[in-house]
Amino acid sequence: MANADGLKRMNQLLSELGDPQKDLRVIHVAGTNGKGSTCVMIASILEEAGYSVGLYTSPHLETECERIQIWNGSDRCMIEQADMDALRAKVNSVAENILHTDEMKNLKVFEVYTAIAYLYFAEKKPDFVVLECGVGGMLDSTNTIDHPVACVITQVGMDHTEELGSTVEEVAKNKAGIIKRRVPVVSQSDDEVVRNVIKKVAENNDSEFIDVNSALDDYGYLMPAMQGKYQKKNAVTAALAVKAVGIDVPRDVLERGIKKAILPGRFEILNETIGASDEKSGPLFIVDGAHNPDAMQALVNEYNEFSKVKGIGRTIMIFGCMKDKNSGHMVDILTSGIEDCEYLAVSIDYGRAESAEKISEMISSAGCKSTVCRSLEEAFWAAMNSGADSVLVAGSIYIAGEMRSIFKKAC
């Protein structure tokens, strides 16, 4: 949870650890949607330009080591599990010695990961670190970077409203909390309210405000490998972030960097063959980490256009989500947006997960066919044996990650 106590606790912890974050050259990225993809694109451009890059993203799909990586030319490495465990033990040991008061107890999981990342990057000394916020910005554990080399804010929408605010303006102010004095700010949102909030905070900090929307035509040649029209805006955001740092990257280097940028679980096609009638090929299988209404609408728009191009008929959607992610709105978007679609409702063993029964009830109430599945494996095999042209998995990054693992083991 992002709150003042957490940020105070994080700063105290880092002080005891020797402030490993102090000498890192950080590009700090916040936003509701698109920040993970943008982080990967920034890292890929920098790598292609000859720099070593530390990459910190969340959440992970299959292994926690995905969160902390070093990219250096042809060598892209996740942190080794042994290193992760050793650094976690170090962080927890220091925490036990200093966190005495009630407010300072119980170090949060994301705080531990962030401290581990700082320690790891301080040891490896990459040229740049691309740092993704967890929740919000102002009180996020990553907002312990005093002077990043650039700040980036991607799409801003309604998510984590209990922590960030009940209006898009309040959420935008929280995201803009990463902005530091005289540090350039790259803003992606085309929402006028959001843009004005971020621009005002930038001006108050004497920081250059760079609007991605005004530069889209200049970078029309960028062709992301990741599926989705929205990825083109992420690509331009990444290019402008690198430029804001002061690096003049030639066009061919930008193009290669963007083409090499891949983030699993973002409209990821695991089986490109549509062949429901062919027992060997099975249906096309797509996993996507869309987990809030804005991301779900973007997914529906992309999937509908993709379906027309591919000639997809019947779709089976495996859907599960968290209780606090406006599940009803997501169901409305799905059931009104995707034609010829049947649903398999799932849940996961996670405290905030919505029950499969509740999800199925909402889908049925919207007039669509829905079946409750007791496990992700059951949903997977039901979908694969359904005779549908396509299987689409979405609603939670956790479900996307687990389903990705199930697919790889089975296929």
Image (spheres, grey):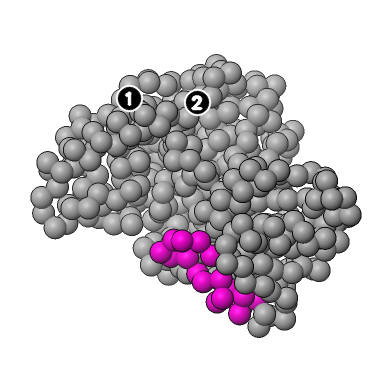
- Between marks 1 and 2 in the image, the one whose residue lies nearer the viewer: 2
Q: Which mark is residue 275?
A: none
Question: From where the camera sits, is residue 220 visible?
Answer: yes
Looking at the image, residue 19 lies above or below residue 369 = above
Residue at image location 61% in from the left, 52% down from the top: 403
Question: Could you say which quadrant of the image residue 356 lies in?
Answer: bottom right
Where, quadrant-wise, is the C terminus in this rendering? Answer: top right
Three-letter amino acid code at the position of disc 2: Cys
Residue at which label 1 appears: 122
Residue at which label 2 appears: 77
The crowding category of the residue bearing disc 2, from other C-alpha atoms within 10 Å (few below 14, some 14 to 19, many at least 20), is some
Looking at the image, residue 381 lies above or below residue 75 = below
Residue 81 magenta-drawn? no
Where, quadrant-wise, is the N terminus in this rendering? Answer: bottom left
Q: Dot 1 lies on which element?
A: helix
Percent x, y of residue 86: 30, 31
Q: Which residues are magenta?
A: 347-363
